[in-house]
Image (cartoon, helix red, strand yellow):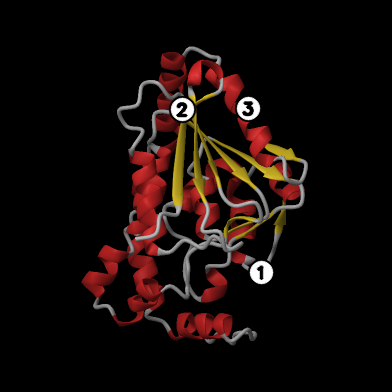
Amino acid sequence: MAGFVTIEKGLGPEGRIAVVRFDRSDGINALSPEALRQLTDAARSFEDDGETSVVVLTGGARAFTAGFDLKDPEGRARATMDLGTLRRHLKLGPRLTRAWQEMEQITIGAIEGFCVGGGVALAVALDFRVMARDGHMRVPEIGLGMNMSWQSVPRMLHLIGPARTKQAVILADQRISAAEAHDWGLVEEVAEPGQAFAAAMALAAKVAAQPPLSVAMTKLTVNRLTHALDDLASHMDVDQFALASLSEDHKEGVAAFLGRRKPTFRGR
């Protein structure tokens, strides 16, 4: 199985920074089911790592990620899965974002180019996001007849509030520029083109210089307070997604995407 994820440890002050790079070397960096598994394993590999206090997650030079890979054979097999199998398969995304959110280390996303769909869901599960000025985000799920899942709606809600969350998710074709994302509170820092990783590493160095135990405990406290009701609020994510995937609108949305045409939705 091809490895899409590389991990480098021991960087920065006292060697306390690690870099996780997700790069399929195709300029698109789509999230296939296998990529979801590898990124989940990468997050979990830090569970017993007391030497690392900051993890920078970055994608390719042209794209953080285009989101879930609609052309991947395993992903496309969802269309013929029974409901039980589909529900199990749909847990891959929530498992990924939960693994990154629950890491004890501070996590920083370095975003170049585009960050779409599942890429946004992954980015908002991190502690901080740094985005290149010429990059953009987009949340296309609704435009494909799906719902925004992976427990990302409550995470977005905490960051940008209800109206902006609705704007980002419901207006599925809208590109959210780096400047807009910063203004909304969706990213914390905007860097010059090609410099998102360097800016993320500079931020990581500032965090790594702080006492690691105090940093970890503070993150835990803030996250527990912030996300206390998230599971309750979004436990139906998977079932909503499974239900939406059975709709005619979903089939039309995906067919239109693959056929590069405008979809016609009928609410059924």
Residue 221: x and y in percent read 41, 24
Q: Residue furthest left?
A: 84
Q: At label 2, which amino acid type do we have?
A: Val
Q: Residue at x 41, y 49 (%)?
A: 39
Q: Does label 3 or label 2 sit earlier along the sequence? A: 3
| Residue tagged 1 | 173
Marks 3 and 2, how far apart in space?
A: 19 Å
Quarter of the figure with residue 27: bottom right
Q: Tag 1's secondary structure?
A: loop
In the image, residue 188 sits, relative to residue 145, either above or below, namely above
Nearer to us in this view, 24 or 67: 24
Task: Give the CA separation, mark 1 to mark 2.
Answer: 33 Å
Residue linked to disc 3: 203
Rendered-image quadrant of the N terminus: bottom left
Question: N-terminal of the two: label 1 or label 2?
Answer: 1
Q: Residue at x 36, y 48 (%)?
A: 40
Residue located at (48% from left, 68% from top): 69
Question: Which quarter shows the C terminus?
Answer: bottom left
Distance from disc 3 to disc 1, alpha carbons, whole Å, reads: 31 Å
Looking at this view, is 207 or 94 the one in front?
207
Give how far across and how far down residue 62 sits, in percent.
66, 56
Helix, strand or loop under label 3: helix
| 15 on left or right of 1 | right
Q: Which mark is residue 222?
A: 2
